[in-house]
Image (cartoon, rainbow, N blue to C red):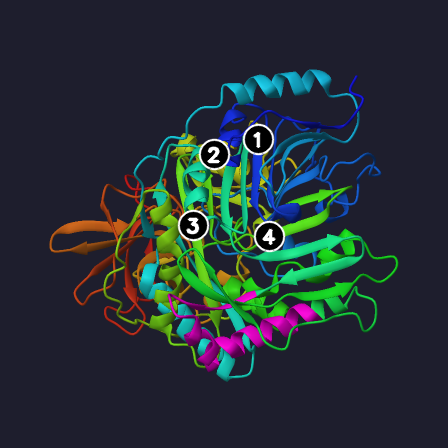
């Protein structure tokens, strides 16, 4: 047994190499920069994981009493993803999430490796039972590998790309002018293929960028490498500090102080954070500086203000987080309505990005960064979010460039490259103000029974099982289908057994009449039971035809879309924005925008392959011309 729970280590490695030494251990992590007064915290092998049904905010208060001379000792370490905002406010569903990560990952470590501000390493533990663990860690540190350069990686703007972001910003400016909000933080996403680990990526990038609040977490379901400059919350005792960043310039700090747009953007968010802290602070204790400071961070300059407060009696970390989450600097003002606007205008749901990463320790208190400048990885995919605050005088093209200015040094730091976005042609600013479908209501499949046999059964069940597994972490049980010809629907609601219903096959009048509607990011790759949005769009009696924010063709409300052009058959890419088809005939997948002379076709399991036209064009549907589903294309 150890007589002390803080033991000096004979180690001179940088924190990134210590992380690499532990990368094959369970649940390794590293925090580098200003955490806990400066230095680094590295750990592995937690003794407890947050359960799916635990309240992550409340869990951070489940700590043993502080004892001994540790600076950190251990505690809860992990992330609080952006989606946890729905635990605080009644928010609409997010846009489609092509690579979902858990909204909360927290692990409890009873010991950590701590590097103090002078560079000395210590083994710190919350109790005195870690002698065997210390010996094992010393052996790992003695064999720490040299960091290797990450594999070459090329990032591209995820669809709808540059044009989609410009359209979103333009619509946001219009909604600000209409008085709906004062500011919203709109983000785009950069995607890449990547087969390496986030620990190696972080070890390569962190020494080059020296982030104030760097963080890396490696988990079995994905990882993050955060190079964040921004403090979200620090609580020591009852004293709380938040350091919102708002206002960005590539190289000239004087430009920031002289920019009315950047200063207005900053003042609004400082006021928002003062208000958030005021909900749980002792009356009169909230303080903010009169003037922000300009600080350099990873290739750009930012305006930063430290807002402080004293917690009122009875308020702990859970109350503090419920008052302030998600961070105001990455949402907008008023915060709740800004969150609604973000859901409507962004094309991809946020994961860890714009949430928070950090720890709660009985010794060091609570400390969380704002999860910006953060790489996220899962199943061979790597992505990076970038955004900015949109205010009344924002220029959409300049806002796009600000996102890229923030992303370029990060991508360069991992040895990657960013594909140029290309010229932007503004296609529309008429983006919707509608609630997206809610995945929590479940998923479904419809299929055809013909001659007593289900058509394409394996493809339907595989698609449904994938949705059940991805969205709910559940397994689709065996399903019995009727042998009666007609249409069959399989419904799955999480936590319940699936249901099967049969109905006679309904014939449709041809051609199908389509009305285009813009929905950034589309409906995603799951067939969701929540059809309220589609029902509302179909109120005029035509079938909704969904377009992305850049005008790219996606899908119809109930069918895949095909375009016959110049003798070839084309269809939109199955890239996570649309439902993968089980019935479509072979076609060239491409990014498509409607052109004069295009012949439109729809394909679904029940209707087969059928002709379609845009509303207001010829030929109009002929009354009394029902169509029986094709026996070859269903």
Measured Cα–Cα span from mark 3 to mark 2:
16 Å
| Magenta span | 245-274
Q: Residue reaching furthest left? A: 566
What is the secondary structure assignment of the residue under circle 3? strand
Front position among marks 1 and 3: 1
Q: How many discs appear?
A: 4
What is the secondary structure assignment of the residue under circle 2? helix
Q: Earlier in the sequence, mark 2 or mark 4?
A: 2
Vertical side of 23 occupied by 607: above or below: below
Q: Which mark is residue 369?
A: 4
Name the residue: 48% across, 61% down: 534
Vertical side of 131 occupied by 300: above or below: below
Q: Earlier in the sequence, mark 3 or mark 2?
A: 2
Discs 1, 4 touching: Cβ within 8 Å: no
Characterize the local packing of mark 4: few (<14), some (14-19) or many (20 or more) Cα atoms within 10 angstroms.
many
Q: Quadrant of residue 110?
A: top right
Q: Quadrant of residue 426?
A: bottom left
What is the secondary structure assignment of the residue under circle 4? strand
Q: Which mark is residue 199?
A: 2
Characterize the local packing of mark 3: few (<14), some (14-19) or many (20 or more) Cα atoms within 10 angstroms.
many
Residue beneath label 1, please?
28
Name the residue: 80% across, 53% down: 237
Measured Cα–Cα span from mark 1 to mark 3:
21 Å
Residue beneath label 3, please?
384
Measured Cα–Cα span from mark 4 to mark 3:
16 Å
Name the residue: 11% across, 55% down: 566
Characterize the local packing of mark 2: few (<14), some (14-19) or many (20 or more) Cα atoms within 10 angstroms.
many
Residue 265 is one of the magenta-drawn residues: yes
Q: Earlier in the sequence, mark 1 or mark 4?
A: 1
Measured Cα–Cα span from mark 2 to mark 1:
9 Å
């Amino acid at each position: 047994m150890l007589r002390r729970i803080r033991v000096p280590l004979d180690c001179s490695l940088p924190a990134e190499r210590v992380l690499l030494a532990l990368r094959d251990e369970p649940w390794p992590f590293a925090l580098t920069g200003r955490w806990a007064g400066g230095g680094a915290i590295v750990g592995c092998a937690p003794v407890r994981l947050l359960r799916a049904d635990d309240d992550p905010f409340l869990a951070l208060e489940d700590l043993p009493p502080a004892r001994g001379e540790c600076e950190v000792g251990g505690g809860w370490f992990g992330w609080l993803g952006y989606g946890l905002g729905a635990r605080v406010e009644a928010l609409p569903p997010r846009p489609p999430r092509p690579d979902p990560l858990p909204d909360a990952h927290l692990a409890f470590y009873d010991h950590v490796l701590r590097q103090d501000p002078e560079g000395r390493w210590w083994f710190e533990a919350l109790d005195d039972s870690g002698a065997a663990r210390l010996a094992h860690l010393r052996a790992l540190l003695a064999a720490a590998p040299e960091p290797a350069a990450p594999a070459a990686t090329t990032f591209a703007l995820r669809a709808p790309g540059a044009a989609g972001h410009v359209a979103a910003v333009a619509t946001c400016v219009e909604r600000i002018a209409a008085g709906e909000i004062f500011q919203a933080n709109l983000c785009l996403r950069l995607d890449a293929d990547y087969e390496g680990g986030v620990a190696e990526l972080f070890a390569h990038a962190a020494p080059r960028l020296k982030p104030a609040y760097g963080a890396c977490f490696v988990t079995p379901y994905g990882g993050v490498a955060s190079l964040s400059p921004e403090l979200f919350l620090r609580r020591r005792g009852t004293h709380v500090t938040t350091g919102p960043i708002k206002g960005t310039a590539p190289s000239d700090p004087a430009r920031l102080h002289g920019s009315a747009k950047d200063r207005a953007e900053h003042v609004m968010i400082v006021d928002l954070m003062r208000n958030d802290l005021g909900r749980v602070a002792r009356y009169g204790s909230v303080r903010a500086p009169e003037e922000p400071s300009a600080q350099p961070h990873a290739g750009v300059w930012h305006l930063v203000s430290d807002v402080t407060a004293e917690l009122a009696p009875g308020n702990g970390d859970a109350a503090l987080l419920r008052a302030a989450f998600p961070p105001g600097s990455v949402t907008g003002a008023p915060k709740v309505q800004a969150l609604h606007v973000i859901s409507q205008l962004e094309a991809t749901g946020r994961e860890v990005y714009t949430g928070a990463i950090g720890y709660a320790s009985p010794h060091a208190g609570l400390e969380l960064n704002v999860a910006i400048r953060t790489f996220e990885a899962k199943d061979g995919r790597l992505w990076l979010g970038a955004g900015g605050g949109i205010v009344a005088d924002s220029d959409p093209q300049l806002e796009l460039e600000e996102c890229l200015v923030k992303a370029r040094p990060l991508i360069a730091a991992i040895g990657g490259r960013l594909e140029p976005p290309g010229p932007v042609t503004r296609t529309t600013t008429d983006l919707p103000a509608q609630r997206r479908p809610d995945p929590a209501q479940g998923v479904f499949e419809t299929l055809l029974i013909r001659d007593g046999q289900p058509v394409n059964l394996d493809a339907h069940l595989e698609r449904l099982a994938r949705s059940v597994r991805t969205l709910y972490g559940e397994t689709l049980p065996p399903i019995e289908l009727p042998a009666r010809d007609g249409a069959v629907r399989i419904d799955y609601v999480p936590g319940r057994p699936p249901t099967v219903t049969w109905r006679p096959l309904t014939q449709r009048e041809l051609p199908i009449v389509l009305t285009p509607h813009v929905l950034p990011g589309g409906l995603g790759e799951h067939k969701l039971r929540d059809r309220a949005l589609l029902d509302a769009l179909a109120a005029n009696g035509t079938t909704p035809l969904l377009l992305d924010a850049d005008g790219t063709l996606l899908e119809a409300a109930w069918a895949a879309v095909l375009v016959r052009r110049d003798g070839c058959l084309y269809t939109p890419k199955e890239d996570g924005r649309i439902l993968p088809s089980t019935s479509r005939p072979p076609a060239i997948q491409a990014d498509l925008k409607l052109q004069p002379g295009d012949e439109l076709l729809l394909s679904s399991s029940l209707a087969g392959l059928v002709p379609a036209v845009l509303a207001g064009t010829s030929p109009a549907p002929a009354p009394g011309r029902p169509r029986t589903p094709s026996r070859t294309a269903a």
